[in-house]
Amino acid sequence: MKRNGLAFRPVGLAMHRIGKYRVVNSVGLAADTLLQHWPTDDGEDFSEAVMACLDGLYDRIPPEDVRAAFIKAAHEANIIVIELVRPAHPRN
C-alpha cells in the first residue's frame, strides 16, 4: 500500500447538517469521509467511490481519479461540492 503521493486538489463539502463542512484532500481522507461521515451507504456512485479509494490506496489508480469518483458520489448524495481552485498565475 502506497502512503505518500496520495494527495489531490482539495474538495470542500457542505454536509447535510447545518454548519457541517469538510475539506478532503487525500485518498485516505476521502475513504474515511465515505465510510464514517457519509449520509448514506447506498448508491452506485458511492460504491464506485469506495472502490476507487481502495484502488487509490493500493496505487492502482491515481489520486485525481479518486477525487473525480468522490465528487461524483457527493453529487449523488446531494452534498454541496466546493471545488477549491488554485490561481492560474502565482501572485507576486
Image: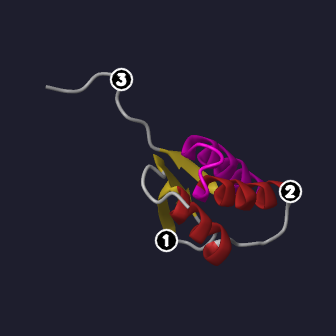
Residue 16 visible, this angle: yes
Q: In this picture, is 88 found above or below 49?
A: above
Q: Residue at x 57, y 61 (%)?
A: 30
Do the residues under discs 1 and 3 have CB atoms within 8 angstroms? no
Q: Which sits in the foreground, 67 or 16?
A: 67
Q: Position of residue 76 (x, y in %)?
A: 77, 54
Q: Earlier in the sequence, mark 1 or mark 3?
A: 1
The amino acid at mark 1 is Gly
Q: Residue at x 57, y 41 (%)?
A: 64
Identify residue for label 2.
44
Give the residue furthest to the left.
92
Q: In this picture, is 2 found above or below 86?
A: below
The amino acid at mark 3 is Ala
In magenta, the rendered stretch is 57-78
Q: Is residue 74 left or right of residue 46?
A: left
Please identify, in this view, whether the residue under mark 1 or under mark 2 is nearer the observer: 2
Identify residue for label 3.
88
